[in-house]
Amino acid sequence: MRLLVVSDVHGDYDALEQAYRAEKNVGAVIFLGDGIHEVERFEAAHAPLRVYMVRGNCDFGTNAPLQGICAFEGVLFLYTHGHAYGVKASYQALSEAAQAARADVALFGHTHIPLCEEQEGLVLFNPGPLADGVYGVICVENGKAKFSHKRVMF
């Protein structure tokens, strides 16, 4: 399963489309907040593609949740924007929430800084801000996940 992971779209619908077109055989998109209206438009345009989404601190007028949990090929993901966990100061609260949920991976945005780091068996992954052309791809197979950061070509 190939996952497209995006965050912090901040109005750049074209970058979202470009990232999707650049990645072949995407099985799902995970959106991590700040640009939910663009992602809702994207979801409508690409049905029946599965799109998982949460709201960020800049997403007003939506009832989308602050976090979600999903599993692919035996890997459990907690996904959130990150502002509710104070990720700009520390990853501790996010790590604790992910471990309490028994997640293998915590996906988050908000900081506008790409990250892929393992802490005590938990992978923390921030795809970076799509508004700056950065996104993430996760390939999940047989209970293992491989992470990469990519760039949209403007």
Image (cartoon, helix red, strand yellow):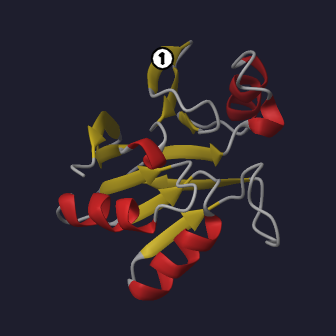
What residue is shown at x 52% (from left), y 80% (from top)?
A: 41
User: Where is residue 125 shown, x and y percent of the image?
Assistant: 49, 31
Helix, strand or loop status at disc 1: strand
User: Where is residue 16 shown, x and y percent of the image?
Assistant: 39, 62
User: Where is residue 111 shown, x and y percent of the image?
Assistant: 62, 30
Q: Quadrant of residue 45?
A: bottom left
Q: Is residue 123 left or right of residue 109?
A: left
Q: Is residue 32 above or below residue 118?
A: below
Q: Quadrant of residue 24?
A: bottom left
Q: Quadrant of residue 110?
A: top right
Instruction: Identify residue for label 1.
Output: 118
Dot 1: within a 10 Å radius of its alpha carbon, few (fewer than 14), some, or many (20 or more) residues?
few
Foreground pick, 129 / 94: 129
What residue is shown at x 72% (from left), y 29% (from top)?
A: 94
Regarding residue 47, the answer to whether it shows in the image is: no
Count of numbered tags: 1
What residue is shown at x 79% (from left), y 27% (from top)?
A: 86
User: Where is residue 34 shown, x and y percent of the image?
Assistant: 64, 54
Residue farthest toward the top in the current orientation of the protein: 120
Q: Is residue 51 left or right of residue 69?
A: left
Q: Is residue 124 above or below residue 132?
A: above
Q: Is residue 7 left or right of residue 13?
A: right
Q: Which amino acid type is shown beneath numbered disc 1? A: Glu
Regarding residue 15, the answer to whether it shows in the image is: yes
What residue is shown at x 49% (from left), y 57% (from top)?
A: 30
Specify the quadrant that holds the N terminus. Answer: bottom left
Q: Is residue 88 above or below residue 112?
A: above
